[in-house]
Image (cartoon, rainbow, N blue to C red):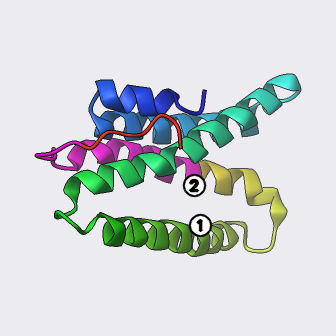
Amino acid sequence: MANLFGVLVDKFDKRLILGLSSAGSGLAIIGYISTRGPLEIVLLSLFGFFSFSGFPLVFSLSSDYAPEGSSSLTNALAWGLGVTGGGVVGPIVTGAIIANDYVHLAFAFEIMALIVLLSALGTALIPKSKRTTKVPLFH
């Protein structure tokens, strides 16, 4: 199942698949905080699936926009900004929303999910690349 997005990226526009992955992540987390019982576990698993499949899609997409011979630098920037930026900004925003009162944690997750959904829509604003690289099915 982990290679599902790799197959989809070869058949459809990478921007669309990245947007679907991001939207799936945002919707799954909203579903997770809105439900109880076994469905909670399913939605949390879906959140993980969409989240962890989205980042390789960013690498694939960035390779299409990188100048020849610069894909390593582009991937390093995507990794550095994505992991470092997301790892720093996400907790700061969440912490600012909850303001040391965990009663607001669900609301903070809803805001973060909204940001993810807006970024999913933002993938449509990425200009179409002139070239396309294939995503390997097996590493």
Q: Where is residue 124 in the image (x, y as percent from the top left)?
A: 25, 42
Residue 35 appears at what percent x and percent y?
78, 30
Front position among marks 2 and 1: 1
Instruction: Classify residue 106 as left or right of residue 58.
Output: right
User: Does the magenta-highlighted stretch encompass residue 92?
Assistant: no
Are discs 2 and 1 less than 8 Å apart at CB? yes
For residue 90, which numbered disc appears in the image?
1
- Badge 1 density bin: few <14, some 14–19, many ≥20, Cα 10 Å: few
Residue placed most toward the observer, 37 or 81 = 81
Q: Quick one: which residue is furthest to the left in this view?
A: 130
Q: Name the residue under label 2.
A: 112
Name which residue type carries label 2: Met
Within 10 angstroms of label 2, few (less than 14), some, or many (20 or more) residues?
some
Asked if residue 125 is among those painted magenta in the image, a careful observer would answer yes
Q: Where is residue 18 in the image (x, y as percent from the top left)?
A: 40, 41
Residue type at mark 1 is Gly
Left of 25 or right of it: where is 7? left
Q: Residue at x 54, y 42 (%)?
A: 53
Bounds of the magenta segment:
112-132
